[in-house]
Image (cartoon, helix red, strand yellow):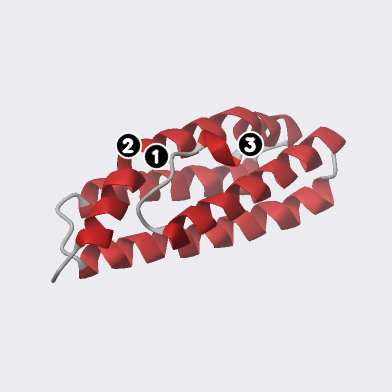
Amino acid sequence: MLKSDLERVALPPLNAIHDEEVEMINAIQALCRAGDEPGLATAVAELGEHFEAHFTLEEDNMGRTEFSDLEEHRAEHDAMRERYASIAEDADLAGMTAFFEEELPAWFVDHVASLDVVTAEHVAGWQG
């Protein structure tokens, strides 16, 4: 996955968070290909914590700025929180590889393009 796969948003700190997550996803993909299950468990846990902080920051900003689509955006986060936890807890190496090579990158690109871009524009322009 390339950082350039993600659209840039109107909040530079959020772009930095996205870039960090791309790097973490790439590292997990390498661990999957190497079959490094102990390293994979650690990296998956670290990315899960990073995503949680990222999602919470976005949700707090949406609430603070009275963003009208907060619940839709939160629902997307909640669905990924649930899916990610399921993969982290139950997936074998093949399942992890499929998730981190295909499913998560596709979701991430779509999520940023369809929700984070709009959210960041709103938060950046908020005059509350």
The secondary element bearing badge 1 is classed as helix
Residue 109: image location, x then y, percent: 47, 35
Who is closer to the viewer here, 82 or 127?
127
Residue 44: image location, x then y, percent: 67, 52
Amino acid at circle 3: Phe
How packed mark 2 is, by other alpha carbons closer than 10 Å (few <14, some 14-19, many 20 or more), is: few
Answer yes or no: do the residues labelled 1 and 2 have beta carbons within 8 Å?
yes
How packed mark 3 is, by other alpha carbons closer than 10 Å (few <14, some 14-19, many 20 or more), is: many
Answer yes or no: do the residues labelled 2 and 3 have beta carbons within 8 Å?
no
Look at mark 1 in the image and give the residue it sits on.
Answer: 111
Look at mark 3 in the image and give the residue it sits on.
Answer: 100
Please state if 19 lies on the left or on the right of 64 as rendered: right
Residue 114: which numbered mark, if any? 2
For the point 78% across and 39% down, which residue is it? 30
For the point 74% across and 46% down, which residue is it? 27
Amino acid at circle 2: Ser
- Going from the N terminus, do you reach mark 3 or mark 1 first? 3
How packed mark 1 is, by other alpha carbons closer than 10 Å (few <14, some 14-19, many 20 or more), is: some
